[in-house]
Amino acid sequence: MTAEFNAELCGAPGPLSSLTFEQILGLLESVANRLASGELGIEAAADLYEQAEILHAAAQERLAAVEARLASLAQPAEPSQPSASRPQ
């Protein structure tokens, strides 16, 4: 069974698809701090850890997409083929 993102549990301002990479990283930091506090019960900690896994995967996907975009921009442009002109 795959868990779904729970914005309320993570303190997110909206659905995962609407979050920026930076917001996701901020949420991961917040979740890590909550987990490290030791103030959560075992079930709540497990639920929050599961959400951290979802956030981590989303951050990796966003980063991979940006890296791919940057790699494509770094490729030299294909020289355009000059149209062949016929001698007249």
Image (cartoon, helix red, strand yellow):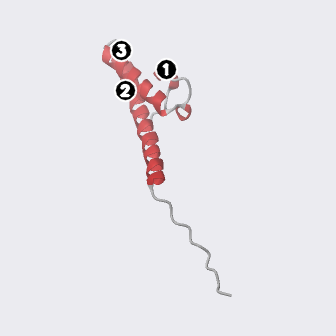
CB within 8 Å, label 2 to label 3: no
Q: What residue is disc 1 on?
A: 11
| Helix, strand or loop at mark 1 | loop
Q: Which amino acid does label 2 sit on?
A: Tyr
- Dot 2, crowdedness within 10 Å: few (<14), some or many (≥20)? some
Query: Mark 1 vs mark 3: which is more N-terminal?
Result: 1
| Residue drawn at x 44%, y 42% as measured from the top left | 61
Query: Gap between marks 2 and 3, in whole Å?
Result: 11 Å
Extreme bottom residue here?
88
CB within 8 Å, label 2 to label 1: no
Q: Position of residue 87 (x, y in %)?
A: 65, 86
Q: In this view, does 62 lie above or below 73?
A: above
Residue closest to the eye, 74 or 1 = 74
| Residue drawn at x 43%, y 46% as measured from the top left | 67
Q: Name the quarter where the C terminus is drawn.
A: bottom right
Q: Is residue 77 above or below residue 67?
A: below
Q: What residue type is labelled 3?
A: Leu
Query: Gap between marks 2 and 1, in whole Å?
Result: 14 Å
Q: What residue is disc 2 on?
A: 49
Query: Mark 2 vs mark 1: which is more N-terminal?
Result: 1
Where, by quadrant of the figure, is residue 54 drawn? Answer: top left
| Residue drawn at x 51%, y 64% as measured from the top left | 78
| Helix, strand or loop at mark 2 | helix
Q: What residue is disc 3 on?
A: 40
- Left/right of residue 5 with respect to residue 60 in the rendered view: right
